[in-house]
Amino acid sequence: MLIGWGRKLAFRRRAFFTILLIFLLAVPVSFSAMIEVDGFIHNDTTWTDVDTVYVTNTVIVDSTAQLTIQPGTVILFGDGAGLWVWGQLYAEGEETDSIMFTSVIEAYGGTPSAGSWTGLQFYLNSSGVLRYCHFRYAINCVQTFAAPVEIYDCLTENFSDRGFYIDGGTDKQTPTILERCVARQDDVDLIGSGTGIYVYEYSDIIISGCHVYNCQVGTDINSSGPTAPRFHVVDCDIRDNLLYGIYVHTCG
């Protein structure tokens, strides 16, 4: 829950293995600093921590555009809203100043339902880098479809479906990097639900140094037949998930 609108929010330091992940959220001083956005982004755009960004309806980054999100920025989403990327997205927080993506309900001191917003989605031929980002209460927090995306030191939690959803499509191996990331259910009502990391179709993914727990399935590696993913799971802590830690299977 967001605390103290008008001052910085510090998330507890959590050490996994020998790696220390720090998620620190800087909150703007007032609602008057909030800017509302929706629709298409056609030109290169930067969101900063000067204003809280309120996505009232889904924002679409056009294939010709690049969206840059600076450290400390807070992005709030209305019911059913999301961020769809067809171009490029660079959301690179810092170890002591992360980027927050969550439901607007948290800004008012409430507790959203899992799936309150759709999530961040990268579509065919888009690309991006995520670093020190914190995603809460989405359907699929981060989803990629045939898009080479690099994801480092990011946290997904309290999702209704999946923390990280990596779909390589059916026509080519699409490389994705997922390093030192966390997928978990932190809300007591959500423990034992959802999938932490879901890999589908022609994905080519390295999952390294990640921590996945309190989900229904920790990591689900899935294909629909001949389009099987290639994957490497290295030095991960996957535990306390209700059904499976790592589940590798085909559905056709």
Image: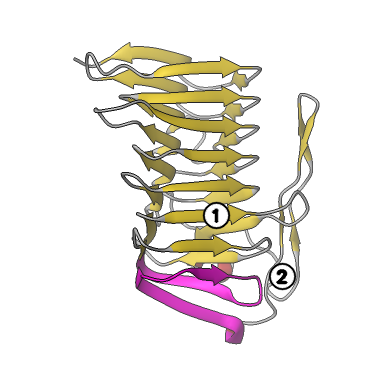
Q: What residue is at 23 percent from the left and 19 percent from the top? A: 224
The question of residue 49 being in magenta is answered with yes
The secondary structure making up most of the magenta span is strand
| Total marks in image | 2
Q: If the image is split into quadrants, where does the N terminus sit?
A: bottom right
Magenta segment boundaries in residue numbering: 32-59
Residue 1 as seen in the image, left or right of residue 121: right
| Residue beneath the point at 69% across and 64% down | 3
Give the CA distance from mark 2 to mark 1. Answer: 28 Å
In front of the other: label 2 or label 1?
1
Residue nearest the viewer, comparing 87 with 180: 87
Tag of residue 90: 1
Of mark 2 and mark 1, the one earlier in the sequence is 2
* In the image: residue 116, left or right of residue 239: left
> Which circle marks residue 4 in the picture?
2
In-front residue for pair 165/172? 172
Q: Can residue 106 be seen in this view?
A: no
